[in-house]
Image: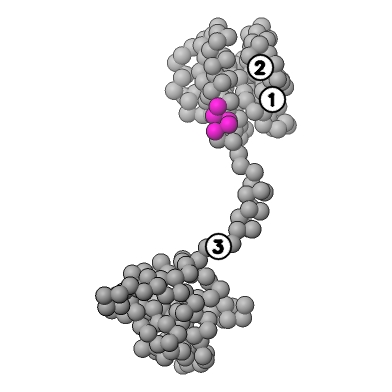
Amino acid sequence: MNTIIIEDENLSAQRLEGMLKKCDSSIRVLAMLPSVAESVEWLRQHETPDLVLMDIHLEDDLCFKIFDLVPLTAPVIFTTAYDEYMIKAFKVNSIDYLLKPVNLLELMAALDKFKALRERFAKPDFNTLLQYIGQRVPEYKTRFMVTVGNKIRSIETSEVAYFYSDEKITFLATRDGQHLPIEFSLDKLTTLLDPQQFFRCSRQYLVGFPAIQAVLTHFKGKLKLELAPKARHDVFVSGDRMADFKDWLGR
């Protein structure tokens, strides 16, 4: 674990370094910096350390000035002889707030707290995550439960020609010409169905690719669809969906 100590008293900085080694021999102190100016310059020229130990009163200003001048994202353990800055310290990246003279047991507890938080909020491996997402096959809805009289039927999605809305009720039309009410809105269906197979051509119709028998040009540049089985309404492609529809047809 790499850390830096920002402390304007040299003896205090050396004492902290020794205490850190007692707490965890794997800790590397990369720099001991006495001022805001030197801290900002070092942080601009180096990678962000894993942890920063920071006194509040430095030789040229309060340490909070550092956060105004450089994007410091590393967690911080504050060390100070004063407790009046505690609230302000916890508004930045604070892990703990230790009063001087720093007690070894308190420092060990602060380091344990840092390690626990780091493990809990460890950054994910985004490359592996993206590869995993890219390999996953989306799971789309494969069947619908519908009520016909006093019977409940299961209809495979592959049997559905299209969906439509009429009088605030959503229907599915099967390829053999049945029109059956279902409990899903068209908006919801759009998220459940494979977009390669179904397209929301208008507010009223969500059509399956095999159901499209013809695409006709209509007045004002509109497109009219002829579906099988025959739809109960004229089915048009909305103007704002026309480019996406043509792209979908050509996939």
- Type of residue at label 3? Pro
Placement of the C terminus among the 4 image quadrants: bottom right
According to the image, label 2 marks what residue?
24
- Which residue is pictured at 36% across the width and 74% down the height? 153
Distance in Å between CA atoms under marks 1 and 3: 42 Å
* Residue 81, numbered label: none
Between 46 and 132, the residue placed more toward the observer is 132
Considering every residue shown, the one lying at the far left of the view is 150
Disc 1 or 2, which lies upstream in sequence?
1
Relative vertical location of residue 158 with respect to residue 6 in this rendering, above or below: below
Of residue 163 and residue 34, the one placed in the foreground of this image is: 163
Sequence order check, earlier mark of 1 and 3:
1
> How crowded is the residue under tag 1: few (<14 C-alpha within 10 Å), some, or many (20+)?
some
Considering the image in quadrants, where does the N terminus appear? top right
Q: Which one is earlier in the sequence, the residue at label 2 or at label 3? A: 2
Q: Position of residue 157 (x, y in %)?
A: 47, 74
Q: Is residue 197 left or right of residue 30?
A: left
Q: Is residue 37 visible?
A: no
Q: Would residue 167 be found to the left or right of residue 29 on screen?
A: left
Estimate the spatial distance between the alpha carbons at disc 2 and disc 3, rounded to whole Å.
Answer: 46 Å
Circle 1 sits on which residue? Answer: 2
The percent coordinates of residue 116 (x first, y second) are: 55, 27
Image spot of residue 210 (x, y percent) = 53, 84
**Is 114 inside the magenta-drawn segment?**
no
Disc 3: which residue: 138
| Residue 117: in magenta span | yes
Mark in front: 1 vs 2 = 2
Highlighted range, magenta: 116-120
Q: How many marks?
A: 3
**For discs 1 and 3, the disc positioned in front in the rendered view:** 3
